[in-house]
Image (cartoon, coloured by chain):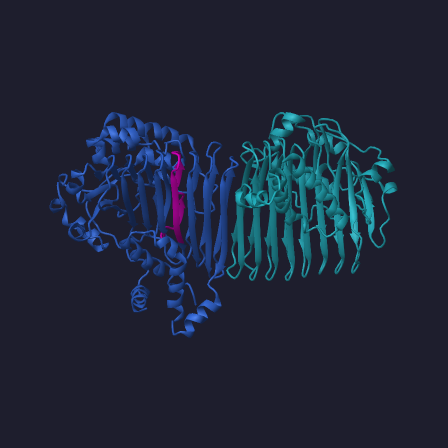
Amino acid sequence: MSTLIKQDILVELSANAGTGFEQVREAGKTAFQAQGFPTNKSEEYKFTAITKKIEQNIQNLAPAGAFDVTAEQVKANVFEGYAGDVLVFANGHFLPSLSSTIEGVEVAALSDKADTALGSIAKPEKDPFCALNQSSFEGGIFISVPKKAQVQKPILLLNFFKADTGQVIQPRVWIEAGDFAEVTFINHSVNLSDASYFVNKVVEVKGGVNTQIRYYKLQNDGKNAIEVSNLETDILKDGRFSSVTISLSGEMVRNNLSLNILGSNSEGNMYGLYLLNGKTHVDNHTNVDHTVAHAESNELYKGILADSSRGVFNGKIFVRQDAQKTNAFQQNNNILLSEDAVVNTKPQLEIWADDVKCSHGCTTGQLDEEALFYLQARGIAKDQAKGLLLYAFAGEVLDHITDESFREYCTELVQTRLGSKF
Amino acid sequence: MSKDNQILEELTSKEYEHGWSVNYEADEAPVGLTEETIRWISAKKEEPQWLLDWRLKAFKTWEAMSEPKWANVHYPKIDLQSLKYYSAPKQSSKPKNLDEVDPELLDIYKRLGINLNEQKRLQGIAVDAVLDSVSVATTFKGTLSKLGIVFCSFSEAVKEHPELVKKYLGSVVPMTDNYYAALNSAVFSDGSFCYIPKGVRCPMELSTYFRINAANTGQFERTLIVAEDESYVSYLEGCTAPQRDENQLHAAVVEIYAGAHAEVKYSTVQNWFPGDKNGKGGIYNFVTKRGICAGDFSKISWTQVETGSAVTWKYPSCILKGDNSIGEFYSVAVTNNYQQADTGTKMIHIGKNTKSRIVSKGISAGKSQNSYRGQVQVMKRATNARNFSQCDSLLMGDRCGAHTFPYIDINNPTAKVEHEATTSKIGEDQLFYCNQRGIATEDAVALIVNGYAKEVLNQLPMEFAVEAQKLLALTLEGSVG
């Protein structure tokens, strides 16, 4: 347990957390006290000294609280050509007045849904930050897609963050989908301040039989922000879950993504792209747990690292004894563009079943000299050629975004970054 | 096929071939580990003061350390105080040549298939045979010494070449390295020492054969290989132990130093007693092996075939310090019944244009757990470093596990690092194909496994490759059906 971070952090944070969920919060508190802030001795946080970062930059964690967002701000931050629905949040608090009413989908502030089984999917014992959030999250949202509902338009979760240095924002999201439902979420965060604050978010997704859920996330945090995000989902029979995580900035970002495959004939897909510069540190920890037979998981994470940025990837695939006929694939590719950039990667497979096909691949290197030469030989300037090749490298991940306007928006961001910076 | 059949048949009737033990009169240290034990061992071996001091320092370091817990293996806590740290066959005087060695001891090696006398004439391999805590005999000393090569037991080296031992001992694996390395540094009994002078190409394979005979004894041997600039040596290591119900501890340290343009090839066929079908008994094999490519253009190559031990915890590593140096690691690890193996390598790229290659093939059967744990680290100034890693796992049976923990840490943009891993089982269609052509299922499995491991077995010297192939078939006997 760190000494700098105030010992009574839980008291202060929970005092401001509001009412409801007393039992849930108590369980979170117990789990956090049992784990404490992770140190560099913890295998899970070996390369990401997040506690140290919080100590250096933040020290006194105090809750940030809600604030007002204007309709203009919302309008300005929805991507061009976006035709879906929007749900607006200020520091994790749901703002119904600025949000769309979505046909056939139940949306409510978590405080109105006191019987939600928070912590039943993202278990607080697994991760200290998940436990911290459970003990003292603020606001929060409950989204329920009923049985057989086909939500055609995507749902944009537009998060506004505004906090002073030293403050903490703890959003909480609960998503549940009934059997045969289909829905797409886009999570986008907008920072209204450059201060060094700490975002600790937990998202729980409860799938049903044959549900199709897509979850896209764009991380474009303030350059001094520290973020830990936990997303965990249960995939049932015939279910499909796909996620795309794009990380572009922030001081230190940690994403924990966990897929629990609990039903057969199901599929989990995880795609990620981290495009880093400056001193940004992004850590993606993914975890796929195959507990039943006949399921499939695919994973592709790609990174381009410039300046003194650091990329960490740890992909875990567990194939339990009963999970015969599992197909699990995992790939991580990195390109280092500068002397000071660092990559730590650990693709990990743990397999207890014999009739499976599992593979992982991992590469770290730089651009193919020959491809570069090929383009140059055809009259394309070196910088442009580089940009083109890097974009092609990144494009493989972007292709997995189904919503066109969001894909275009991300593509634009990526291209600007690659063209101007590199 | 007939030869393979013969091998299989030969092996069907046996479980662990080397499970016997011999009663000979032995000199043993009292049970337990204290400073006194260390002084006792040191005095017994008539060691100089500096070595005793070194041991005592290591003991102090060890006392402050705690047992590592991170490996993916489970075993009951070892009571280090109930072990004997020294056991040596009693010999009236130090033998000068093989004819003077106690025939009973030579017989032990004969039963292991290593006839020290015969080997002398036929195979052209120099053998250093280590029984429990001491080296019994070293063959071919004369031939080697003409070239300036020193190949002898560690205790002899301490007496005759103290300056070399002093210079290199602990230079690659410092006593503070880890719990078991510190323990070894404190209590190591014997082992082999090998020194190849500058520009010499060792004309024959050097080999050490380790055998644990006594009960309740830990074996702590220490091997030190020094290859000066532009030299070459190929070194083999083999090991067996009697079949006993209680677990025995083997904590060795191997250090390799390679100068500029030197090449060291280290091959191991590890066949310690793995425990019986129900997981009873067996050797705990906790070994620290590390080589340093200290000079430019040097090369260290590790090849290991791991079939024995109840629990293995072993990571032969290369520190690629010299520019353009090369590190290689080829491994086949087979686990059956209740065996557990956590093995792999570390490649630390420090020099420019350094290359490393890792090929690890794991085979798990029965209720065993087989883990690959490796690290490829490219330091900041290691420009143009290159690594290729491949770790494949083959699962036979649905109660076993195969795990991969590769750590890849890159601090230089010019590095090219590739890692790939696959896990699979022997395909029904492959077996069917063989069956169709009249090959029985069991033969087909041996065939497929040997093909799967070929890439590694090819790296072994001839005599070892044959032994290794037999071992593979033996270890997997009865695991398919």
Q: Which chain is cyan?
A: A
Q: Position of residue B418 (x, y in %)?
A: 49, 46
Residue B291 can be seen, yes or no: yes
Quadrant of the rendered structure where residue B327 is? top left
Q: Position of residue B189 (x, y in %)?
A: 27, 37
Question: Horizontally, is B236 left or right of B145 in the view?
Answer: right
Q: Position of residue B414 (x, y in %)?
A: 50, 37
**Which residue corresponds to the image point at 13% horizontal and 43% vertical from the top-left?**
B97
Residue B88 can be seen, yes or no: no
Q: In front here: A132 or A93?
A: A93
**Quadrant of image for the C terminus of chain A:** top right
Whether residue B309 appears in magenta in the rendering, the answer is yes
Q: In front here: B215 or B198?
A: B198
| Rendered shade, chain B | blue
**Which residue corresponds to the image point at 32% horizontal and 33% vertical from the top-left?**
B186
Quadrant of the rendered structure where residue A217 is? top right
Q: Is residue B235 above or below residue A294?
A: above
Q: Position of residue B275 (x, y in %)?
A: 36, 54
- Tell me the magenta residue range: B306-333
Most common secondary structure along the magenta stretch: strand
Quadrant of the rendered structure where residue B336 is? bottom left
Question: Horizontally, is A80 left or right of A37 in the view?
Answer: right
